[in-house]
Structures are given as C-alpha cells and as structure tokens.
C-alpha cells in the first residue's frame, strides 16, 4: 500500500509541476525571461523524510547539492532567446 501511495504522489507531483511550467511558459513567453520545463529527477533527493523511511542515504537518493548543481548548469548553459 505504501508503494501505491508513493506512485500516486509522485505522479500527481509531476502533473502539477507540468501544469505550473505550462502556465509560466505562457506568462513569460513575450519577455526576456523564459520557462521551459521542470528539472524532474529520476531519483529522489535526500531529505529528512527519506532518512526516516529507510537508512540515511537509502533508496539510492541523490544529495541535494548535486541536484542543485544540475539545475544551475541546465539554466545557465542555455542561450537566451
């Protein structure tokens, strides 16, 4: 049952993220700023919740600093326009 709840939660989260990005893309399409797509992780980020549900660093979670570096690289390496 826990796995089903996790899958439903992740699916809802990704749909909500996609809807937010679509709205932001429409809002920012005429300005200097732009919004394309969310950085969705195939792996979980290490949080206090993931440490409580399994061993610390379990579930093959990525560290938050690695995910933030990937997001910064994705945003800063694209040409504006």
Image (cartoon, helix red, strand yellow):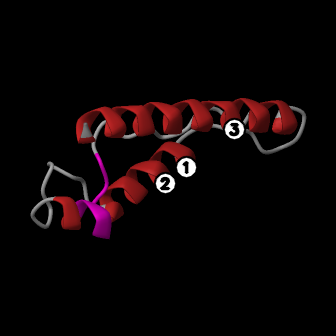
Query: In the displayed structure, would residue 1 be above or below residue 66?
Result: above
Given residues 57 and 81, the one toward you in this image is: 57
Residue to which mark 3 is pinned: 20
Query: Is residue 53 on the magenta stretch?
Result: no
Could you tell me which quadrant the N terminus lies in?
top left
Q: Earlier in the sequence, mark 3 or mark 2?
A: 3
Residue 16 position, x and y percent, is: 61, 36
Residue 39 position, x and y percent, is: 48, 40
Give me the C-alpha separation between circle 1 and circle 3. 21 Å
Could you tell me which quadrant the C terminus lies in?
top right
Residue 52 position, x and y percent, is: 21, 67
Mark 1 Cα within 10 Å, few/some/many (few <14, many 20+)?
few
Give me the C-alpha separation between circle 1 and circle 2. 6 Å
- Which is closer to the viewer, label 1 or label 3? 3
Range drawn in magenta:
44-50
- Which is closer to the viewer, label 1 or label 2? 2
Query: In the displayed structure, would residue 40 be above or below residue 70?
Result: above
Task: Using the image, tell me which numbered label, if any, was put on residue 49.
Answer: none
Res 33 quadrant in image: top right
User: Residue at coordinates 31% horizontally, 36% vertically from top-left?
Assistant: 42
Do callouts 1 and 3 mark residues in contact (Cβ within 8 Å)? no
Residue to which mark 1 is pinned: 76
Mark 2 Cα within 10 Å, few/some/many (few <14, many 20+)?
few
Do callouts 3 and 2 mark residues in contact (Cβ within 8 Å)? no
Res 17 quadrant in image: top right
Residue to which mark 2 is pinned: 72
User: Residue at coordinates 25% horizontally, 60% vertically from top-left?
Assistant: 50
Do callouts 1 and 2 mark residues in contact (Cβ within 8 Å)? yes
User: Residue at coordinates 63% horizontally, 37% vertically from top-left?
Assistant: 79
Q: Is residue 47 visible?
A: no
Mark 3 Cα within 10 Å, few/some/many (few <14, many 20+)?
few
**Mark 1 residue element:** helix
């Amino acid at each position: 049952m826990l796995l089903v709840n996790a899958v439903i939660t992740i699916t809802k989260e990704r749909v909500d993220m996609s809807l937010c990005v679509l709205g932001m893309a429409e809002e920012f399409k005429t300005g200097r700023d732009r919004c394309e797509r969310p950085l969705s992780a195939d792996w979980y980020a290490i949080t206090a919740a993931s440490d409580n549900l399994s061993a610390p660093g379990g579930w093959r979670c990525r560290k938050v600093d690695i995910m933030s570096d990937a997001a910064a690289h994705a945003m800063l390496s694209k040409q504006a326009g």
